[in-house]
Image (cartoon, rainbow, N blue to C red):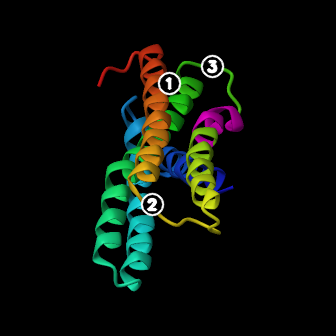
Amino acid sequence: MAGLLEEGLKYWALIAARKYGKVTTDRDYLIVPVTAAVGFATVENIATAYGAFRNKETKRLVLTIVERTVFGIPGHAMTAALTGVNVLARDTRLEPLTTWQALQQSVLLHGLSDFTLFAISAYRGNIGWVPPQGKTEICFTLSCVVGIQLWLVFILRGKLSQCGIVL
């Protein structure tokens, strides 16, 4: 559900900017949702870091900040860019996409990432997100997240190429 809500907010930012602002270039279809995503991720990161800070464990706080900065922000930005390129294809290339089709891949990849993290945490008997402990669990978690983000990069590059956008 978090993936649907968060990706929906990024989509809404683009639609609002198109309606009330000036979305005039193909790149604007990427810049607007990515900017919304980075803002959203920043708020989420502050809340997560505050939760780690309340535990008064410096190691956990530093690990949380690194995790959220290295993986959280790029993940949010790439799913937003994927939504943006789908909306671009719909609006300017006249591809017949519904709102759900424009959001679908972003929602599913975001949800897969969240599910993977919560499943790893639940494997240790935790309810909700508890950061991994131990080298093996940390490496496994990082491998899963990096794998999902590489898959996202592959999909996004293909979509950008289809729309003729070179970064």
Marks 3 and 1, the one that precedes in the sequence:
3
- Between the residue at mark 3 and the residue at mark 1, the CA separation in whole angstroms equals 17 Å
Q: Quadrant of residue 22?
A: top left
Residue at x 42%, y 68% (from the top left corner): 43
Q: Which residues are magenta?
A: 99-107
* Callout 1 amino acid: Ile
Marks 1 and 2, the one that precedes in the sequence:
2
Q: Nearer the viewer, mark 1 or mark 2?
A: 1
Direction from residue 25 to residue 113 in the image, left or right: right
Asked whether residue 160 is in view, the answer is yes
Write down the residue under mark 2: 40
Residue at x 38%, y 72% (from the top left corner): 49
- Position in image of residue 25 (x %, y %): 37, 31
- Position in image of residue 99 (x %, y %): 68, 38
Q: Quadrant of the N terminus?
A: bottom right
- Position in image of residue 141 (x %, y %): 47, 48
Write down the residue under mark 1: 155
Give yes or no for residue 115 being in the magenta stretch: no
Q: Main secondary structure of the magenta part?
A: helix
Q: Quadrant of the C terminus?
A: top left
* Callout 2 amino acid: Phe
Residue at x 38%, y 63% (from the top left corner): 42
Say which element carries label 3. Answer: loop
**Nearer the observer, 163 or 151:** 151
Marks 3 and 2, the one that precedes in the sequence:
2
Tag of residue 95: 3
Direction from residue 46 to residue 13 in the image, left or right: right
Q: Quadrant of residue 143?
A: top left
Say which element carries label 2. Answer: helix
- Between the residue at mark 3 and the residue at mark 2, the CA separation in whole angstroms equals 28 Å
Direction from residue 140 to residue 70 in the image, left or right: left
Give yes or no for residue 104 being in the magenta stretch: yes
